[in-house]
Amino acid sequence: MSVICLKYRILPNRAQETVLNRTLEICREVYNSLVNQRTALYDIQKETVSLYRQQAEVSKWKQEHSELKTIHSQVLQNVAVRVDLAFQSFFRRVKAGDTPGYPRLKGIGIYDSITFPQAGITGCKLTENSIYISKIGTVKAIIHRKLVGSIKTCTIRRQAGKWFACFSCEYEPTPLTESKEFVGIDVGLEKFAALSDGSFVENPRFFRRDEKALAKAGRRQAKTKKRSAERRKANKVLSRIHERIRNRRHDFVHQLARSLVNKFGLIAVEKLNVKGMVRNHCLAKSISDASWSMFRAVLSGKAESAGRIVAEINPAYTSQTCSQCGNVAKKKLKERWHHCPMCGLSLDRDTNAAFNILKAAVGLHSING
């Protein structure tokens, strides 16, 4: 079984949007109360609080605070789940030797989604051109495609002044017909990717293209007064630009991954430590803009559902080693052409690396399978 997330734009009227905003604000206050409860009990009594205890506390609070009764019970229970996940993540990173920030309180406007954990049973219902949301009503929606499989959860999200319903569905994928074609991929900054078949994928540089617009919107936002109508308008402009960049990057990555999965049976990629690479302040912005991690995650997900194989290969010395004779000739980063003094092979440095990545993956696959 695989999981797919289907996202629909919803169009609440003014009254429904007011209810949605009030729901988010109440959930934010519940979230902050649960975080404060955990912190206070540990500071005073050295006592840890479990998820189930906090979920029971939320049920008790409903008897004391009437506004909590205006929200679906499972949405409130999910708030406690989010708090528990935040603390689990914090302690896991502490145990691993990292220095994570302590789970913070959510400020106004920061808490921007609610989740119905059993949307397939209760809470949400999808119709031809609308979505019924419990405690909210029937909201108009743009249903651009049918749901696949069985609904597991539904998340209502506020994003850049827009509203979306995200359905998580579990389904049985249909593998593609078998392909005997293999490809190695070397990602980079000058070109987004070099393929072992000699082709290249241009780097779209979405963030760089809108960097001036972001800077201009940021300057306008900085000149507005906090909590004013002008600040809210400036925030919306800024968030819309970020949304545009995110959507373009998301579309590019998904389309590239789909075209590769449709064509190749074995796809070899580099196993990169992107988190470590962005510590280089000279390249951090360009590496983040290239979205290598997103590409690898999307490619792996699509390949799994299509019955394809994605092999992650250690990229060490793939650019230095000749893909034809195996001779190792060190090159500086600025040298973009591979010319082997031993066998005379001459080709693009990244294409040579893609060949080496593919050879390593084919060897690994033949050993394992």
Image (cartoon, rainbow, N blue to C red):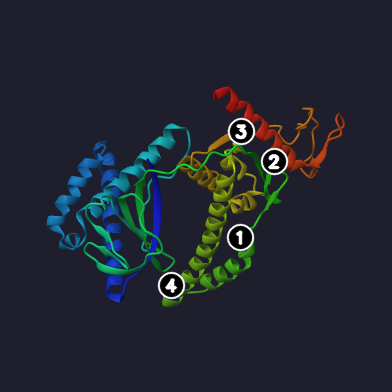
Badge 1 vs badge 4, beta-carbon distance below 8 Å: no
Q: Which of the two discs, 1 and 4, labels the residue nearer the N terminus?
A: 1
* Amino acid residing under circle 1: Phe
**Figure check: 363 above or below 278:** above
Q: Can you give x and y, in whole percent of width and height, for residue 288 in the image?
A: 59, 51
Secondary structure beneath dot 4 equals helix
Task: Between label 2 and label 4, give the one nearer the viewer.
Answer: 2
Q: Nearer the viewer, mark 1 or mark 2?
A: 2
The three-letter amino acid code for the residue at tag 4 is Arg
Cα distance in 3D space between marks 1 and 4: 25 Å
Task: List the residue tagged with mark 2.
Answer: 196
- Label 1, secondary structure: give it: helix
Q: Horizontal placement of 251 versus 363: left or right?
A: left
- Residue, disc 4: 232
State if disc 2 and disc 1 touch (CB < 8 Å): no
Q: Residue at x 38, y 37 (%)?
A: 91
Give the mark, 4 or 3, whose residue is nearer the N terminus: 4
Residue that numbered label 3 is attached to: 313
The residue under the point 55% across, 47% down is 262
Side (left or right) of 303 relative to 8: right
The label nearer to you, 1 versus 4, is 1
- What's the residue at 25%, 50% (across, down)? 118
Whether residue 338 is visible to the viewer of this picture, yes or no, is no
Q: Nearer the viewer, mark 3 or mark 1?
A: 3
Q: Residue 363: x, y in percent?
A: 63, 26
Give the Cα separation between the discs numbered 2 and 4: 49 Å
> Could you give the CA–CA distance between mark 4 and mark 3, rounded to whole angstroms?
47 Å
From the image, tell me which residue sits under label 1: 206
**Tag 4 near tag 3, CB within 8 Å:** no
Q: Residue furthest front?
A: 177
Q: Amino acid at mark 2?
A: Ser
